[in-house]
């Protein structure tokens, strides 16, 4: 493991962690979505460093591309771009709970560090992934378990995304219907004085 590899690994890992922390603390959904794109790009770079170039490309095309387009579509459809319109009436209790949970997770990790799990059984040869890619290609090791063993989870995830988009469309229509009716009443009220003035003038 070269020094350049270690530098890139820790750099992209640190940027991903910082971007994720900024992502969960933004009030604007659009800004949070952009920080999430940064996290996904860093994860793609980590996959490339692990000799999983195909998964890194899919990470960029599917998650940072298609899935984020769906997120931004839902945000714009629900008109959530302005932070002032998002009323947060939960108080500080959820933030305290999240902070205590984070402290508990960090404490559990720190207590686990003095007794690490031996990594020798999990180590593989340096060129094993490249050799397998030359034999079976880069797509088959991902596609075969995805469409055989994990097919149900894959389809359930797609159905959940579809349900989220449909729910956003329904909520957007319900939110826009009162505005449309109000605009119609206002325009009708504004035209009535014009009609009366025209009648008096005639």
Image (cartoon, rainbow, N blue to C red):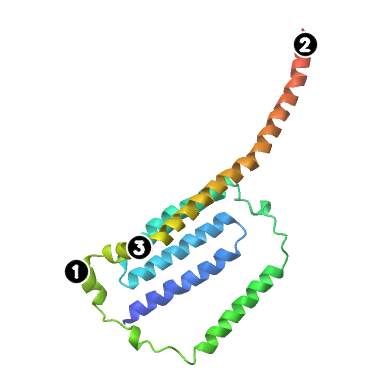
Question: What is the spatial separation of the Cα atoms under label 3 and label 2, in whole angstroms?
Answer: 73 Å
Q: Which of marks 2 and 3 precedes in the sequence?
A: 3
Mark 3 or 1: in front is: 3
Residue found farthest to the top? 202
The residue tagged 1 is: 135
Residue 34 is situated, as x and y percent measured from the top left of the image, at 50, 58
Q: Residue at x 60, y 56 (%)?
A: 28
Looking at the rendered structure, which numbered label has been put on residue 199? 2
In-image side of 88 versus 31 (left or right): right
In-image side of 156 versus 140 (left or right): right
Q: Which of marks 2 and 1 precedes in the sequence?
A: 1
Mark 3 or 2: in front is: 3
Residue 126: quarter of image: bottom left
Q: Quadrant of the C terminus?
A: top right
Task: Tell me the element at label 3.
Answer: helix
Whether tag 3 and tag 2 are in contact, CB under 8 A, the answer is: no
**Residue in the foreground of this view, choosing between 199 and 88:** 88
Question: What is the spatial separation of the Cα atoms under label 3 and label 1, in whole angstroms?
Answer: 19 Å
The residue tagged 3 is: 146
Residue 64 in view: no
Task: Tell me the element at label 1.
Answer: helix
Residue 62: quarter of image: bottom left
């Amino acid at each position: 493991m070269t020094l350049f590899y270690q530098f890139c690994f820790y750099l992209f890992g640190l940027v991903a962690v910082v971007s994720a922390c900024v992502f969960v603390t933004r009030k604007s959904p659009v800004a949070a979505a952009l920080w999430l794109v940064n996290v996904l790009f860093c994860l793609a770079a980590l996959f490339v460093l692990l000799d999983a170039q195909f998964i890194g490309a899919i990470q960029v095309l599917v998650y940072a591309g298609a899935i984020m387009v769906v997120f931004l579509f839902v945000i714009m459809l629900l008109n959530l771009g302005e932070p002032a319109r998002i009323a947060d009436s939960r108080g500080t209790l959820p933030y305290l709970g999240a902070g205590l949970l984070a402290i508990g997770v960090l404490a559990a990790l720190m207590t686990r560090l003095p007794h690490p799990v031996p990594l020798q059984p999990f180590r593989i040869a340096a060129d094993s992934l490249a050799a397998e890619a030359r034999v079976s290609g880069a797509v088959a090791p991902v596609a075969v378990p995805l469409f055989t063993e994990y097919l149900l989870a894959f389809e359930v995830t797609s159905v959940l995304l579809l349900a989220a988009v449909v729910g956003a469309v329904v909520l957007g229509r319900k939110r826009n219907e009162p505005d449309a009716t109000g605009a119609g009443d206002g325009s009708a009220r504004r035209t009535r004085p014009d009609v009366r003035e025209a009648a008096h003038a005639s």
